Image: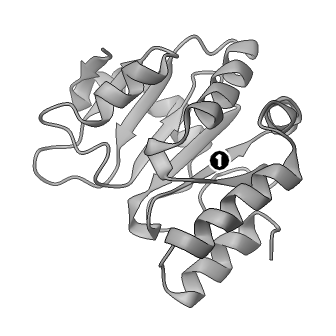
């Protein structure tokens, strides 16, 4: 299981790298600070498939990220939590449902200390993972995940069957990935 961090611990250890990756909360339609980052969409948010997790893990570890940082960005009660999780799918699964956290229920940020990638698990957009990264991260991740066309088709299949955000929101997010 991961190491649960109090918010003060997160602030002292990971806030700087977090804020270098993610846009300010509430910046509509903008998720990452670097507008040059490529973005892909994955189904099911933090409940992503083992294959998608494996592709992220393989790429992140190749770039030196030996652990996954997870931050609840939406909680009021219980107070927001952060966790350090190993690159093991079952560890992430256990962390998602850990008592006293809202990682599976509310919007969550996932990232590595390299600062070269990040993901927004957006429950508010009906459980999608918005994954962004620099050129090197994406040039490794996309082939590891089966290629851009496979990613697009998997997401669109999910969207057809399960995704129910408002039309305006869905169009903006799909446009962000260039899949419109």
Is 169 located above or below residue 108 in the figure? below
Is 101 located above or below residue 106 in the figure? above
Residue 114 x/y as whole percent:
65, 22
Residue drawn at 37 percent across, 30 percent down: 93
Q: Quadrant of the C terminus?
A: bottom right
Question: Within the image, what quadrant is residue 1 found in?
Answer: top left
Whether residue 29 appears in this view of the structure is: no
Is 3 located above or below residue 155 in the figure? above
Residue 161 x/y as whole percent:
55, 72
Q: Nearer the viewer, residue 166 or 137?
A: 166
Question: Within the image, what quadrant is residue 12 found in?
Answer: top left
Residue drawn at 82 percent across, 50 percent down: 150
Q: Which residue is mark 1?
A: 131
Crowding around mark 1 (Cα neighbors within 10 Å: few <14, some 14 to 19, many 20+) is: many
Residue drawn at 46 percent across, 69 percent down: 125
Disc 1 on helix, strand or loop? strand
Q: Nearer the viewer, residue 2 or 32?
A: 2
Q: How is the image coloured?
A: one colour
Residue 179 x/y as whole percent:
81, 69
């Amino acid at each position: 299981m991961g190491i649960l961090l109090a918010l003060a611990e997160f602030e002292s250890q990971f806030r700087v790298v977090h804020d270098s990756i993610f846009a300010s909360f509430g910046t509509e339609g903008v998720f990452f600070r670097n507008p040059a980052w490529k973005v892909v969409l994955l189904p099911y948010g933090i409940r992503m498939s083992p294959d998608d997790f494996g592709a992220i893990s393989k790429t992140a570890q190749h770039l030196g990220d030996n652990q996954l940082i997870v931050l609840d960005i939406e909680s009021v009660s219980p107070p927001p939590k952060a966790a350090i999780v190993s690159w093991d799918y079952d560890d992430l699964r256990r962390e998602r449902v850990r008592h006293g956290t809202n990682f599976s229920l509310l919007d969550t940020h996932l990232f590595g200390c390299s600062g070269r990638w990040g993901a927004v698990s957006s429950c508010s957009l009906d459980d999608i993972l918005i994954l962004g990264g620099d050129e090197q991260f994406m040039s490794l991740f996309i082939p590891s995940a089966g290629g851009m066309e496979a990613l697009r088709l998997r997401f669109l299949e999910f969207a057809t069957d399960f995704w129910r955000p408002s039309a305006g929101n869905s169009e903006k997010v799909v446009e962000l990935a260039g899949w419109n």
